Amino acid sequence: MAWHPATIVRVIAPIALLACGSGGKQPAEVKTTPTAEVKQTLPVAVTEEDREKRRHDEAVAIIPEGSTCLPGDLRNLNAPHLELAAIGSSAVVCAVDQDRTRLLGLVACWTVDIKDGSLAYQAPSPMPGRGFAVMFDDRCARGYCLPKDAKVPADPVALMAWSRDSTKVAVLAADTVHIFDAASKAHESSFSIRGDKGVASEPTAMQWNRDAIFIEASDGTTSPVYVFKTDGTPVGAIEALGGRDKAALSTRNGSFMVLDEGRVAISEQGFSSLTIYETETGKRTKLVRKLPASLCKKDELDALWHDPTAAVGAKCKEYVARNYAHLIGADAVAGTKNLLVMLRGPRLGELAVIDSKTLAERKAIKMPWCGGGGAGGLANGLVAPDGGSDTASKPRPAKPAKGKKKPSSSKADDAAETDDPDAGGQ
């Protein structure tokens, strides 16, 4: 029998409707339970404790807990930077991370026995008055969170510094310093670093001494240090003594140091001079280091101060390496009569006792390198244009000054210990 098209439609259409459930009871919706694999893809909140553990794990991978020697890797260009502080009556050295992809902060710390240079490991913690750079995490720097209306820099890096009594914390984010209570982490106040008497270039570091916050900055040519009271009042850049132009002191080829409670200092051109600044009064005192007769022509030395790669004579290079390289970027704390100085460049890993009036070196204290290795550091010349304290070079031992014998157990050394037993520990 032949099927007519209309007949086919009448038969197929009801079947199609039944297949779609038309005219009948709708089937119950089947509910599924997420599988274990699905549950694992759900976001997990990361706490500050989690971040701290991650930083700790990365830090001990660089310097193991309990280490009593300096790892040789600290000589590398981007390695943690050794910094010096006086905590109580102890000289403390800490390795501070400089790698801007992680900025772990303090990686390890040691108390130094200034008699023999031996190191006693201690858990790293912020050094009073000394700052370091950290990464932002969700608008927070180590758990200190910016107000909702505060600007977070495009480059998510903050500068942090603890007050000397460790009760307050300063966080520099973009162009603003935020003050927090250290214990509760509550935000208390903020102020801009720009404007009249404010920072005119790029901030590079922040320190805190008494009621003043010091911000180091650099434009690639000069590196001034600006002073602010903790209420935000700008004091301006620390200026050099003498002269009519009121030029700002520069840490380029030098350094900024927190000497003690109430005094900071700026060294210039490899410790050629040291200007001490009293935090409370702003009083300045200048010390000048007596140097051997120069083997450099004036234009040669000027060229090197501006460009460490400048072409100069071999004798001039040797003179600079011997008299300046170990003190470019040097850190220092004040003892009762002397300065205890963390040396750089070819003498990285050494501390020096330096006379606080003449800046003459009285004694060297060598800290132990892991696996031996002896002295030797990065630099062999002047710093890079960005104001860093070391330039890349193969380590080499420091050369003794001509005409001088290597000291042993001399009366001079005994006198240094007798005159100033803490040698920078106060």
Image: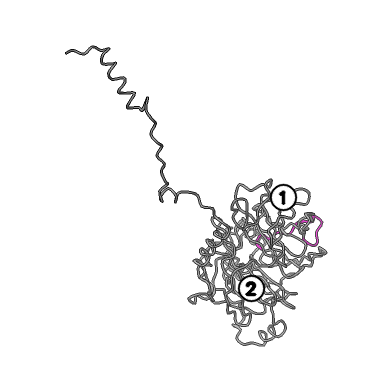
For mark 2, what is the residue? 92
Q: Amino acid at mark 2?
A: Val
Report helix, strand or loop for mark 2.
strand
Question: Is residue 273 in view?
Answer: no
Inspect the magenta stretch and tell me whether residue 68 lies in it: no
The numbered disc on residue 200 is: 1
Q: Amino acid at mark 1?
A: Ala
Task: Look at the picture and state if 7 lies above or below 322.
Answer: above
Question: Residue 258: x, y in percent?
Answer: 71, 67
Nearer mark to the viewer, of 2 and 1:
2
Question: Residue 296: x, y in percent?
Answer: 64, 65
SS assignment for the magenta stretch, majority: loop
Question: Residue 247: x, y in percent?
Answer: 76, 56
The residue sitting at 78% across, 49% down in the picture is 196
**Few, some or many C-alpha atoms within 10 Å of disc 1 (few <14, some 14-19, many ≥20)?**
some
The residue sitting at 67% across, 77% down in the picture is 90
- 74 or 151: which is nearer to us? 151
Residues drawn in magenta: 240-254
Report helix, strand or loop for mark 1.
loop
